[in-house]
Each structure stands twice: as structure tokens, then as C-alpha cells.
């Protein structure tokens, strides 16, 4: 294809544009420095004499045209092209091409940038971070990792490096680089130790500038087994009993980040055997479990929880996992399936068992129906686990003893900090839980009597147990119950 000629008579149809853009040679694209290409979502398509044809996804400002002309020393002829056509070609021309050793200074800087991103993701995975946050504070962009539920600053970048880093992330995630006024979401894959880490990228325009959050999903890492989750013995044996249930509804309540999915995956893992058909509908699929049918919802294309769930019920499932119940139709379908003999696992946003049931009632279900369907209900939280290398034993203060129901002479442990725990005093997390089980022949009245009467009472009992065992400390319990302790009967 004669690109100069094609550019001169710039095509209008998407398919012709696609052919033209696909024919752009990286060497030509690279006439335009990568920082400009990434910052403005621009692709240099062809050069004829001293004129450079540059495709951009949005009508450019005069300032952009001036910067392109200054950087290239050529006169820019600007063409506007839809971002979805342009972005993959920018990625092709800049993303995968090896940078020559004789690279100009700017190119070397870009190479550093892509190395920096790789190293940042690697560091995050090695630090067991669940999320990476990039946000603007005056004069710089702060990079933080969320590790064990807590954010920690790991680096600061100056504004221009941050802009280019964000553009690179957006490019790799298939987002429109030039769009900074609307939120966007996408994802990229990052290879790490022979597996692929799925990184969900979400941007939002804030008053301070564009903010980016990355969620790391290590979908191919092994699943944890129930026994590895360090539940208290009575919680573990209840969960093992749930796996033997012939049908019914098992619901886990808790806020975001309380470890509900990890527990659900461990249950699936325990049930995964040849004679059972296990299905999941999730948003998104967080872990791949070989041998089961997993469906990730995609509301943009109409695949909602309710639609996927109805379709899965036609696939003759024995066990169904519904990632989360958020709407009435899903609640009705899931409870219906449980009442007709399937074993259904799900989660709901709710502080504890009492509010979990209230949430289902808000979604149009009657308490009687919920109680009939339930085979078990659980609430859970995650607290930080004390580092075993440095924790120290201590006495409970009279105040804490009274507030959290410890004996006055009880011995507990406190965080210290050492090399092994990066001087935080903590390593990993431990689950605090409360659970109620229902026998299949129990009447609704008996089931109702089986429910906890007080908010949080069961969670607090379990928290105290883990404190006395030295798994966690009173400071963690205090932050967990700081709002609850004053309002509930905490003894
Ligand atoms: Zn330590």
C-alpha cells in the first residue's frame, strides 16, 4: 500500500482506515517521540517531503500541533481517527518493538519508563499487594501498594514522568490515552513466573488530575484449601459440613476486602470432583479453577449476573457459586435454585449475619423464604496477622479487658516490627468469622431461633479467640470494632 498516497486521500470508512493504520511502519511512527504519542494518543502515519501525517483520536489543540512540529521538525497534517482503531496500532509501533542501542535520549527514557512499569508490577506481586494506586498530591504523583488491606507509599514520581507512566498503563490496558475527562476501565496481562497476572485498570478524573487504580488478579496461582485459611476449629468444621450438604443456600456476609471470595474458592476446591458439575458466575473471575464452568459477567454486552445465572441453570449444575447478590432478579433465581435442590454459594454486602439477611429482604425476598433456603450463613472479616518473629506478649489493659470481654489476667500479643515483616509487625492476614448452620429438617421457627441475636457478638468472640492465640492483636481488633464496640453489647 502506498501510504503517502493513501494519506493524501485520507479514507473515511473504518475498514479502509484500519488497513491504512495497520500498514504504518514502526520506523515511521517513531518519527514522533513516544512520550508525545502516548500523551496525546497520536500515531505518525506517513512522511512526504517535510509533511508528516499524524492521526489523533481527538481534535488537537494548537499547542499539540506546535509540540509535534517542534519535536519532529516537520509540518504536521492532522487527521482525527476513532481511538479504538488507533490505540492498538500505537501499541504495535511503540509497545513491542525493541529499542535500538543507538536510541536517542528520549527513547532511552521511554525504555526506562516501560522497565519502571514492569518493575513496579513485579514489586507489587512480590509484596503480595492486591492493588496499586497512582494519585496526585501537590507537585508529585504518589504510588501506593495495598498490602494486607493497608496502603503503603512505595514511590513518588514527578508530574511529567507520572503522566507518561499513566499513558503507558492506559495504552497497555486498551484505553483511550487522550481521554482524561471520563472514567475508563480495562485490563492488561502481565507475565510473571510462567503465569499471567491479570491487571484491572480503572481511571477517574479527579480535581487534582487523573487518578489510576490497578487491581492485581493472580488467577492462575493455586487455590487455597479450607484447612489453609486458618479459621477457628469450629468455623472450619462448619464449612466442611457445608460441603456435605445436598442442596440449599450458603451465604457469606462482609464488606469488600473481607476475604469472602477466598472462602468461596476454597469451598469450590473442596467440592471439585468428577461426579459434580460446578458452575460460577463472577465479576470478574478472580481465579481459574480447572474443571469447573466459570462465567465472568459483562454488563456492557448484556451478560449480567441474572442472565448468566439463568443460563447456567440450564447447564444442569450441582453446585452454583454466584459471586455476589446485588439485584432482586439474581436473589430470586439463586434462592429458587437452592430451594429446588442445588447447592448455591453466594456473598452479600452486609456487616454481619443479621444485616446480610436484612440485605436479601431489601432485595425483595421474605425472611421466611430466606430461612427455608439457607443451609448456612457466615460473616467474616480479615485482620492483620502478627509477625511470629517479633510479636511480644503483653497483659490486657483493664479498659480493653472490659471493652472486648477478656479476662483481666489474660495474656495477649502486640506488634513490634523486624526485618522479616518490613518493620510493620505484621505478615499476612487471618480471618475472623461467625457462622450459623441449619439442618435440612429444621422448621423455620427453629432456624430463626438459631440466628445470632446481637450484631457482631459472634465476630467478637472469634476475634478474642485469635487474639489469645497470638494470631492478631488488640489494636487490630480495635480498628475492626471501633464503630461497633460502642453501639453493641460488647460486655
Ligand atoms: Zn516481624
Image (cartoon, rainbow, N blue to C red):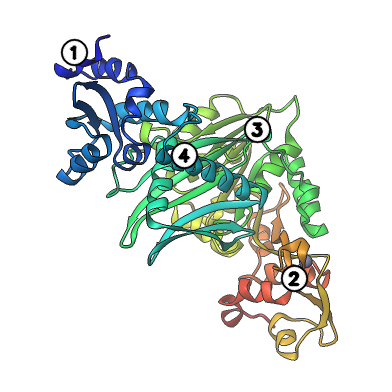
Q: Horizontal and vertical percent for residue 33?
A: 34, 36
List the residue tagged with mark 1.
5
Q: Residues within 10 Å of mark 2 (few under 14, many from 20)?
A: many
Please tell me which residue lies in front, 432 or 111: 111
Q: Earlier in the sequence, mark 1 or mark 4?
A: 1
**Residue 283 appears in view:** no
Q: Earlier in the sequence, mark 3 or mark 4?
A: 4
2 vs 4, front mark = 4
Q: Are marks 2 and 1 in contact (CB under 8 Å)?
A: no
Image quadrant assignment for residue 413: bottom right
Q: Horizontal and vertical percent for residue 352?
A: 59, 63
- For the point 71% across and 80% down, which residue is it? 404
Q: Earlier in the sequence, mark 1 or mark 3?
A: 1
List the residue tagged with mark 3.
195
Quadrant position of the N terminus in the picture: top left
Circle on res. 417: 2
Where disc 2 sits, the SS reads loop
Distance from disc 1 to disc 4, alpha carbons, whole Å, reads 33 Å
Q: Is mark 1 within 8 Å of ligand 1?
A: no
List the residue tagged with mark 4.
108
* Above or below 231: residue 220: above
Where disc 4 sits, the SS reads helix
Q: Horizontal and vertical percent for residue 377?
A: 65, 54
3 vs 4, front mark = 4
Amino acid at each position: 500500500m502506498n501510504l503517502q498516497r493513501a494519506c493524501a486521500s485520507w479514507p473515511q470508512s473504518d475498514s479502509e482506515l484500519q488497513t491504512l493504520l495497520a500498514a504504518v511502519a514502526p520506523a515511521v511512527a517513531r518519527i514522533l517521540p513516544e512520550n508525545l504519542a502516548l500523551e496525546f494518543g497520536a500515531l505518525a502515519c506517513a512522511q512526504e517531503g517535510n509533511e508528516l501525517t499524524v492521526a489523533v483520536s481527538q481534535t488537537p489543540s494548537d499547542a499539540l500541533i506546535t509540540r509535534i512540529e517542534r519535536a519532529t521538525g516537520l509540518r504536521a497534517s492532522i487527521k482525527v481517527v476513532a481511538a479504538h482503531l488507533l490505540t492498538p496500532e500505537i501499541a504495535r509501533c511503540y509497545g513491542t518493538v525493541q529499542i535500538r542501542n543507538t536510541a536517542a535520549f528520549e527513547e532511552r527514557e521511554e525504555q526506562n519508563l516501560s522497565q519502571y512499569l514492569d518493575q513496579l508490577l513485579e514489586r507489587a506481586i512480590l509484596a503480595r499487594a492486591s492493588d496499586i494506586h497512582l494519585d496526585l498530591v501537590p507537585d508529585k504523583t504518589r504510588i501506593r501498594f495495598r498490602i494486607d488491606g493497608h496502603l503503603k507509599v512505595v514511590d513518588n514520581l514527578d508530574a511529567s514522568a507520572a503522566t507518561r507512566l499513566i499513558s503507558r498503563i492506559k495504552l497497555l490496558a486498551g484505553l483511550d490515552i487522550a481521554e482524561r475527562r471520563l472514567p475508563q476501565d480495562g485490563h492488561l496481562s502481565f507475565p510473571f513466573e510462567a503465569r499471567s497476572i491479570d491487571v484491572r485498570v480503572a481511571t477517574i478524573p479527579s480535581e487534582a488530575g487523573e487518578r489510576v487504580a490497578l487491581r492485581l488478579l493472580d488467577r492462575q496461582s493455586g487455590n487455597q484449601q479450607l484447612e489453609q485459611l486458618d479459621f477457628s476449629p469450629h468455623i472450619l468444621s462448619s464449612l466442611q459440613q457445608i460441603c456435605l450438604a445436598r442442596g440449599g443456600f450458603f451465604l457469606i456476609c462482609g464488606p469488600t476486602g473481607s476475604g469472602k471470595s477466598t472462602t468461596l474458592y476454597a469451598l469450590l476446591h473442596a467440592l471439585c470432583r468428577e461426579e459434580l458439575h460446578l458452575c460460577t458466575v463472577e465479576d470478574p473471575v478472580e481465579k481459574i479453577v480447572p474443571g469447573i464452568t466459570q462465567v465472568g459477567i459483562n454488563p456492557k454486552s448484556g451478560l449480567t449476573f441474572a442472565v448468566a445465572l439463568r443460563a447456567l441453570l440450564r447447564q444442569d449444575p450441582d453446585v452454583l457459586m454466584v459471586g455476589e447478590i446485588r439485584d432482586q432478579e439474581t436473589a430470586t433465581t439463586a434462592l429458587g435454585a437452592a430451594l429446588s435442590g442445588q447447592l448455591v454459594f453466594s456473598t452479600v454486602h452486609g456487616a454481619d449475619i443479621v444485616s446480610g439477611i436484612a440485605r436479601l429482604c431489601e432485595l425483595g425476598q421474605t425472611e421466611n423464604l430466606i430461612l427455608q433456603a439457607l443451609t448456612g450463613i457466615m460473616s467474616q472479616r480479615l485482620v492483620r496477622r502478627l509477625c511470629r518473629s517479633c510479636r511480644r506478649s503483653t497483659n490486657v489493659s483493664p479498659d480493653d479487658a472490659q471493652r472486648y470481654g477478656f479476662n483481666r489476667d489474660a495474656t495477649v500479643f502486640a506488634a513490634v516490627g523486624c526485618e522479616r515483616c518490613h518493620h510493620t509487625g505484621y505478615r499476612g492476614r487471618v480471618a475472623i468469622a461467625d457462622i450459623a448452620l441449619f439442618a435440612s429438617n429444621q422448621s423455620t421457627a427453629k432456624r430463626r431461633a438459631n440466628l445470632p441475636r446481637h450484631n457482631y457478638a459472634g465476630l467478637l468472640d472469634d476475634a478474642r479467640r485469635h487474639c489469645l492465640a497470638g494470631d492478631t492483636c488488640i489494636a487490630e481488633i480495635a480498628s475492626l470494632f471501633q464503630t461497633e464496640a460502642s453501639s453493641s453489647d460488647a460486655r
